Image (tube, rainbow, N blue to C red):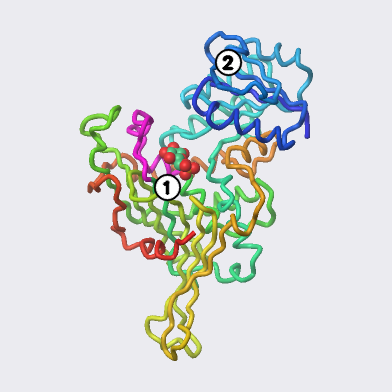
Amino acid sequence: MKRCAIVILGATGDLARRKLLPGLKKLYNNKQLPSDCTLIASGRNFMTTDDFKRHAKLSSDYPIDITYHAGINGLHELLKCKGSFSRIIFFCALPPSAYVTTARQIKAEGFGKEAILIIEKPFGINAASARELNDALVKEFPEEQIFRIDHYLAKEAVRNLLTLRFANPLFSDIWNSSEIDSIQISSLETLGVESRAAYFDNSGIIRDMVQNHLFQMLSLTAMEPPENLNAETIRASKINLLRSLKVERCICGQYSGYKNEPGIRSGSTTETYAELELSINNPRFKGCPVYIRAAKGCSKSGTDIGITFRPINKGPFASKKDLPANFIIVKIQPQAGIILGLATRVPGSDEIIESTAMNLCYHDAFKHEWPDAYEKLLLDAVSGDRTLFVGAEETETAWTILDDVLDKGYSFEYPFGTTPESKLGAKWIEFSEYCTL
Ligand code: BG6
């Protein structure tokens, strides 16, 4: 690996303390980061490195060479004193409103081709603002140096979607609307908005979860086979899929009590639940509805992708009524796994066929430890691999699909701690019966 420096901008914040600093430590201890890498923690306030270590609660054995530096001015000089780096990662753990000025400052400091800018969503609040942000960023650094995080892309079961579809001939030939009846993607959380009220109330669940995480999962579930596994080829295939999506119906809800939470505007109409039906307008999936939902304040937390197959229509069982359909559930979290639903004759009976499930649980199948999503993304940024990062066009296309359903308010309330039943006829409720992982 090339010699690299990692600069965390906004290092005194929550993300750095909770995810980035511990993640880097783990990667370093596992020898996944170059042993000569250097870490700069940058925040707005002046303090010494020891003060920072105390502030960030870094243990005395924190293994990476770390220096605290206030602001961006002088960073170039500081890094020059530490040696020469062929890659410098700037992790912007900053509010999105600061991205463009930060990119300008980094460039003005004298950083160029060696710089990689990592930014986190939201990338704009609609298609126009996303375009504006991307246009402004690309004036400072070329697109290849901008790494947009969607941490769902680094979840193992999401990463496995392409393997499941294209490395298993069992599935690759039946992945189309002649065989698949519908696709469901569901992402539920028990928590409400907690300490992020101000952000969430201006955002809503469609912006917070659907535009990014759910659309990324859908892209990987439904896209055409990429010719190879290069980042750009995969991205092009995802963009094509996104371009073929259309929202057919959308219904939003808000959990009761939301408006009374600290930081929420009184009378807020922000949605905490969204359920959408989409069509995929391409030859592969024409006529196969996609249902997606995301919500906070539900009875359970979990993210699943469900594929239901059409009933059998030929052969000796074609005339049998109520034959259970095949299905696949890709369990993203809390446990990663795959459930395959099969029609099986009940032992001892002559006639009865029931739906049964084969469960693959990652933790049973793979005993080793693997990096969590943030660790994986940090690792990929260090090695310059953009596969799990989101491109400018991808994010703009995703916004374009949703522009007509943003800020429309909600049409029903649901009690906090309950999961609303599907209002659009999606089949995800039935899936939960099999989710034993
Ligand atoms: C974030 C959203 O992107 O993803 C949060 O802003 C949400 O609202 C979170 O809670 C969910 O991530 P995970 O990994 O906990 O499912």
**Please, is residue 154 above or below residue 102 in the view?**
below
**Local secondary structure at mark 1:** helix
To which quarter of the image does residue 287 belong?
bottom left
Q: Quadrant of ligand 1?
A: top left
Residue in the picture at 46% in, 56% down: 304
Q: Whole-percent x and y of residue 290?
A: 42, 59
**Local secondary structure at mark 2:** helix
Q: Which residues are magenta?
A: 190-212
Q: Out of 231 and 161, give the one closest to the viewer.
A: 161
Residue count near mark 2 (Cα–Cα under 10 Å), binned few <14, some 14–19, many ≥20: many
Residue 167 in sight: yes
Residue 127 in sight: no
Q: Amino acid at mark 2?
A: Phe
Q: Out of 15 and 163, give the one closest to the viewer.
A: 15
Check if residue 38 falls in the magenta segment: no
Say left or right for 421 vs 351. left
Check if residue 192 falls in the magenta segment: yes
Q: Whole-percent x and y of residue 271?
A: 30, 42
Residue annotated with mark 2: 52
Residue in the picture at 44% in, 55% down: 185
* Front tag of 1 and 2: 2
**Please, is residue 2 above or below residue 332 in the view?**
above
Main secondary structure of the magenta stretch: helix
Residue in the picture at 47% in, 71% down: 309
Q: Amino acid at mark 1?
A: Ile
Q: Whole-percent x and y of residue 368?
A: 67, 50
Q: Out of 209 and 179, give the one closest to the viewer.
A: 209
Label of residue 401 in the image? 1
Where is the N terminus found, in terms of image quarters? top right
Task: Name the N-terminal-most of marks 1 and 2.
Answer: 2
